[in-house]
């Protein structure tokens, strides 16, 4: 038997129902904040992702050459593609642009629960607003979306300027190493790296910075920095809106394009792969031939949210099995259409079975059976049977639709 590729998944109808329910909760919040959906290609020129994605992601990319000899990559994330599209298509549009997406990404990672080679992100990008209010808006949207899904999580907010200020004297390669250690919360590795460079005190200060939970404590280590006022303003907006977060200046983010505020969300009930959201402010447009526009965004790991929610989001449709005799078939088609037009899922027999066999099948696959025999075809009424209770009544069509509809909304 052929199997699906490692790190990918199949989704059966119940799982797709649950995924779509949660996806639409996310979209709905995005829409209400003014974020409109965009879509970019599944693959892009490799260069788009190698320019500023960071080593980790570059190593994990699915790279291939097409028949024309072009070097392409399946997208490992969507931010770079969205900014490429902005530069190509929307540079002159009035700012800010509020965009969102729901799309799959590909990373060649070691698969485990919550970590896949094909996974979905719901993300937003706010392009062209450079203010504390803009940074705060993106974090408020993130919190509102996660709250709408029902996932239990913790949100951590930091700012790269503090750490950058402390490691400004290091060589670029050493800075990257330090950030990689911090991103993985690998404090032992951080100590070893900095001790080897003759900077054990810096390792200690960075570990202390990571432990700071107030701006005051953090600035006591880094000294006053120019970004302090904007950070304070952003946090004040978050506090006034009631966003629940903690400060963490150890957030380094795995991608290389971030510039300022950074934030991450962690689900309460997942193991190692518990990061369900990541984002921050960044600048990419100038690298792709556009203006040096400030942007801020995040992406939610949709599959991890689904793992965290478990079976909770499943909303089952009420199903009507429209059961008929030969004489009732034409009327049954019209009855099934009337249920569908009322928004109710209605299914008819396709196996040319007798009435008894149709009813037996309906009792396994539906909540109600609507029976249309010769009598019903002539009278214009229906027989409605509740397949869970066995209760059966003769009704006119409108009353039957109302009764099934009321069951669905309970
Ligand atoms: P990221 O942190 O690399 O950021 O990915 C965002 C989220 O995608 C992660 O927090 C995680 O939940 C999920 N994720 C990542 N890899 C996997 C995987 N192998 N399997 C399942 N879920 C995964 C970005 O991608 C940035 N583009 C976010 C952003 C948008 N920054 C600014 N705008």
Image: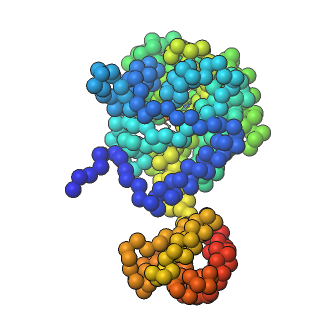
- The quadrant holding residue 75 is top left
Residue at x-position 43% and y-position 48%: 114
Residue at x-position 38% and y-position 23%: 46
Across and down, in percent, residue 44 comes to 42, 27
Across and down, in percent, residue 339 comes to 59, 69
Q: Nearer the viewer, residue 263 or 195?
A: 263
Quadrant occupied by the C terminus? bottom right
Q: Residue furthest right?
A: 240
Q: Nearer the viewer, residue 165 or 121?
A: 121
Q: Nearer the viewer, residue 242 or 13?
A: 13
Residue at x-position 45% and y-position 81%: 326
Residue at x-position 67% and y-position 75%: 398
* Whether residue 30 is visible: yes
Above or below, 83 against 368 in this view is above
Q: Nearer the viewer, residue 323 or 159?
A: 323
Q: Number of labelled discs?
A: 0
Above or below, 11 against 201 in this view is below
Q: Residue furthest left?
A: 1
* Whether residue 183 is visible: no
């Amino acid at each position: 038997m052929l199997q699906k590729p490692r790190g990918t998944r199949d989704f059966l109808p119940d799982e797709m129902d649950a995924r779509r329910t949660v996806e639409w909760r996310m979209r709905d919040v995005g829409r209400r904040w003014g974020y409109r959906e965009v879509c970019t290609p599944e693959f892009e020129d490799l260069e788009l992702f190698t320019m500023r994605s960071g080593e980790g992601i570059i190593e994990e990319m699915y790279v291939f050459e097409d028949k024309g000899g072009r070097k392409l990559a399946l997208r490992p994330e969507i931010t770079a593609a969205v900014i490429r599209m902005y530069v190509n298509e929307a540079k002159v549009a009035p700012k800010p642009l509020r965009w969102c997406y729901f799309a799959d990404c590909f990373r060649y990672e070691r698969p485990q629960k919550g970590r896949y080679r094909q996974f979905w992100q719901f993300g937003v990008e706010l392009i062209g607003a450079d203010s504390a209010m803009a940074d705060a808006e993106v974090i408020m949207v993130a919190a509102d979306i996660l709250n709408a899904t029902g996932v239990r999580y913790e949100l951590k907010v930091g700012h790269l300027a503090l750490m950058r200020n402390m490691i400004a004297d290091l060589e670029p390669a050493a800075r990257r190493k330090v950030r990689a250690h911090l991103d993985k919360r690998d404090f032992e590795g951080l100590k070893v790296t900095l001790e080897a460079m003759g900077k054990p005190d810096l390792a200690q200060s960075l570990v202390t910075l990571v432990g700071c939970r107030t701006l005051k404590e953090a600035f006591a280590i880094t000294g006053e920095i120019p970004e302090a006022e904007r950070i304070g303003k952003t946090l004040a907006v978050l506090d006034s809106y009631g966003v629940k977060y903690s400060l963490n200046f150890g957030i380094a983010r795995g991608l290389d394009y971030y510039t300022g505020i950074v934030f991450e969300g962690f689900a309460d009930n997942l193991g190692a792969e518990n990061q369900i959201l990541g984002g921050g402010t960044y600048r990419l447009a100038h690298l792709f031939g556009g203006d040096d526009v400030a942007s801020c965004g995040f992406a939610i790991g949709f599959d991890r949210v689904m793992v965290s929610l478990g079976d909770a989001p499943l909303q089952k449709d009420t199903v009507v099995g429209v059961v008929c005799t030969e004489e009732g078939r034409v009327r049954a088609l019209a009855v099934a259409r009337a249920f569908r037009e009322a928004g109710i899922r209605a299914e008819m027999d396709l196996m040319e079975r007798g009435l008894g066999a149709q009813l037996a099948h309906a009792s396994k696959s539906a909540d109600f059976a609507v029976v249309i025999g010769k009598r019903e075809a002539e009278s214009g009424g229906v027989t409605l049977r509740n397949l869970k209770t066995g209760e059966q009544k003769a009704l006119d069509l409108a009353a039957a639709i109302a009764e099934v509809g009321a069951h669905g909304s309970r």
